[in-house]
Image: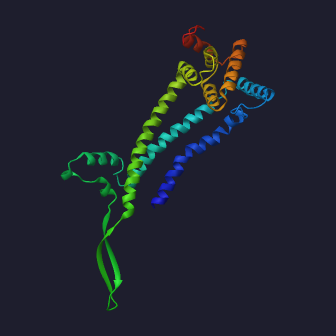
């Protein structure tokens, strides 16, 4: 039963990743075009950079839903961790939710007052009843004390799982807050791009973020993590130049946002 339960947990944990792989559809890998290495002829490199730039230009403003699906998978990961804690709590008859806290309290308690919660959930000894045929041929009953060595391992596994679930819950919650800030703050997007990709010029980053949507930022950030740094710098600069020279290529509704967030075109960063 424990093996089946662990298999069920593994499937639940893998589901958000499988979902994102299905939704992502290999977009990043297709756009990379082996530009992560950067070791190719100048002609080939120029052609691939032009293809990438043309894709970004033609599809600028159309990546929001693609990015939001990634955020949905992160939210599902949080729901999965919390849900599994409740499921496991039910599996252990309501003892799992406070399991780690009980273990910590046990370690800090006086020796005389200690009651090990690990032994309470995973008993190491139990009463066993054996039946065997006696000398007269009748079935005889024998009571004995049995050692359960597997529970010694189980108690360590589940105390680790308790702390691991708590850590995952905290980290995933912080990640979701981080995503919310990114969605509503263009300034944070500029800051993160500048912090992560220092070879890209500051004015280029500001133009791209101001003239694009959150989904475009997310795609560019992922590309920057996978492309050669020099190639990514060139692509970002070319995209910024094209945006600067083609004022008609604007995201609907961004005019007012530009005035509010960027002070009528004045550099506030």
Q: Position of residue 269 (x, y in %)?
A: 54, 12
Q: How is the image coloured?
A: rainbow
> Residue 122, relative to residue 177: is it above or below?
below
Q: Is 56 left or right of 116, judged from the image as shown? A: right
Seen as rendered, the residue at the extreme bottom is: 136
Name the residue nearer the viewer: 15 or 120. 120
Residue under the point 26% across and 49% down: 106
Q: How many labels does the image show?
A: 0
From this view, report whether residue 207 is shown above or below residue 56: above
Residue 170 in percent (x, y) is at 42, 37
Residue 164, by quadrant, is top left
Up the image or down, 265 lies above or below 53; here it is above
Q: In this view, does 232 lie to the left or right of 118?
A: right
Residue 14 % position (x, y): 55, 47
| Residue 32 as seen in the image, left or right of residue 164 | right
Q: In which quarter of the image is the N terminus?
A: bottom left
Residue 218 relative to residue 10: left or right: right
Comparing 215 with 163, the one in front is 163
Instruction: Give the residue displayed 58% in from the left and 23% down from the top.
Output: 193
Q: Residue furthest toward the right? A: 43
* Residue 160 rendering spot, x and y as whole percentages: 40, 49
């Amino acid at each position: 039963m424990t093996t089946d339960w662990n298999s069920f947990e593994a499937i639940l944990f893998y589901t958000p990743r499988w979902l994102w792989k299905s939704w992502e559809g290999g977009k990043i890998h297709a756009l990379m075009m082996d530009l992560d290495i950067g070791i190719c002829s100048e002609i080939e490199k120029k052609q691939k950079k032009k293809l990438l730039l043309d894709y970004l230009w033609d599809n600028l403003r159309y990546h929001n839903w693609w990015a939001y699906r990634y955020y949905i998978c992160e939210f599902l990961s949080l729901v999965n961790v919390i849900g599994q804690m409740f499921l496991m709590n039910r599996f252990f008859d309501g003892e799992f939710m406070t399991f780690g806290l009980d273990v910590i309290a046990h370690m800090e308690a006086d020796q005389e007052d200690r009651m090990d919660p690990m032994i309470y959930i995973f008993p190491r000894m139990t009463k066993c009843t054996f039946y065997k045929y006696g000398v007269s041929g009748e079935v005889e009953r024998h009571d004995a004390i049995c050692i359960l060595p597997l529970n010694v391992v189980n108690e360590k596994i589940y105390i680790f799982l308790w702390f691991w679930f708590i850590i995952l819950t905290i980290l995933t919650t912080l990640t979701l807050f981080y995503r919310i800030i990114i969605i509503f703050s263009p300034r944070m997007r500029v800051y993160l791009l500048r912090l992560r990709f220092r070879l890209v010029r500051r004015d280029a980053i500001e133009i791209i973020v101001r003239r694009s949507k959150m989904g475009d930022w997310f795609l560019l950030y992922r590309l920057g993590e996978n492309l050669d740094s020099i190639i990514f710098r060139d692509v970002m600069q070319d995209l910024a130049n094209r945006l600067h020279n083609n004022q008609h290529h604007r995201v609907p509704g961004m005019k007012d946002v530009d005035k509010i967030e960027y002070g009528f075109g004045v550099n506030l960063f």
